[in-house]
Image: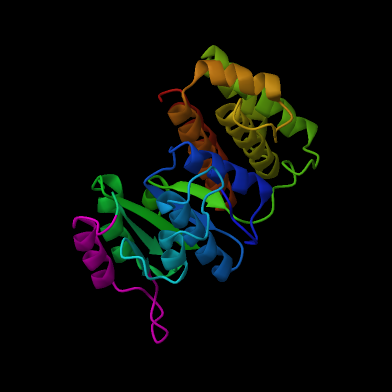
Amino acid sequence: MNFGNIKISEATEKNISALVDEGRLSHAVLLTGSAASDRKKAALAIASALYCTGGGKNKPCGKCSRCVRIKKEEFPDVTLISKDKDRTNIPIDVIKQMKRNAYLLPNESDFQTFIITDAESLRPDAQNSLLKILEEPPETARFILCAKDKSSILETILSRVEQFSLTEDSDIAAGGKIGKKAETAADSFLDSLVKGNEYSAMISLAPLIKDRNNFMDMAEKCMLVFRDAIFIGRTETMLSGSENRAKELRKKFSDKKLIKMTELFDKSSSDAIRNISMTSVINNLISECFTL
């Protein structure tokens, strides 16, 4: 996939590109980080790649009729939803109308795409209304949400979307160091996961109950290994530095479960930031990972 000159991290670009090229991108996506203009451009680029008729692997081509019209925001099957300049929020009525439109047949293609460029401005009632269609979407509808960060998005929404940060790669992914305590915990937990040993997993994370920072580093390391496991054989770039462990996970779990575990670790890291009891965070994480 071709993102052009949009400011986006290399890891995220490769992740999205692989999913789009292989037709495995979720029906609902959340883009966070970077500037609002880049989030919008990235959303339009993804939509263009999905509709592009230019042929070849380097989509969007930027030249076919669909690509040109999507860039100009004139393609009938791509709808952009933004807050009005004189409003601080997107009204729930706008979301209700979008939902009604989502059940209409597409105009020129097989599906419609709805891009919400200011998802952080959705009030809780509007997000709850949106949740219902994300849970049971019509086959002819896709959704791309854009927000500055995840803090304003309800957990119920986050659990229903595939999340991508457009910002720079994490310190670990960029080759930064991770503390020995977090590294050991991550490796031990992943080993327990491969072996299906829940008790061993609990022992692995026990030292982090009173150490939020190392817990978050451990979670980030695990998420990178999950990412590598998903893309083994599809990309030459390994971000985690744990290729052998990624191969073990790949043999053990499906893409769907690896993605779900990534989401569970991401949520746990967010819960740790929000000062939720670490005992509760760790217990919930282990319980959910071993009941997938």
Q: Position of residue 106 (x, y in %)?
A: 24, 56
- Front in this rendered view, residue 247 or 270: 247
Q: Can residue 151 be seen in this view?
A: no
Q: Position of residue 1 (x, y in %)?
A: 56, 47
Looking at the image, the residue that sits furthest to the bottom is 86
The magenta segment is 81-108
Where on the picture, by quarter, is residue 78? bottom left
Q: Where is residue 271 in the image (x, y as percent from the top left)?
A: 52, 47
The answer to if 90 sits in the magenta stretch is yes
Query: On screen, 91 above or below 282?
Result: below
- Front in this rendered view, residue 279 or 57: 57
Query: On screen, 218 above or below 204?
Result: below
Query: On screen, 184 above or below 92?
Result: above
The residue lying at 31 percent from left, 50 percent from top is 134
Classify residue 17 as left or right of residue 287. Answer: right
Q: Where is residue 23 in the image (x, y as percent from the top left)?
A: 43, 38
Where on the picture, by quarter, is residue 34? bottom right
Q: Can residue 111 be seen in this view?
A: yes
Classify residue 1 as left or right of residue 187. Answer: left
The answer to if 74 sits in the magenta stretch is no
Q: Quadrant of the C terminus?
A: top left
The residue lying at 37 percent from left, 70 percent from top is 74
Q: How many marks?
A: 0
Scheme of image coloration: rainbow
- Front in this rendered view, residue 202 or 231: 231
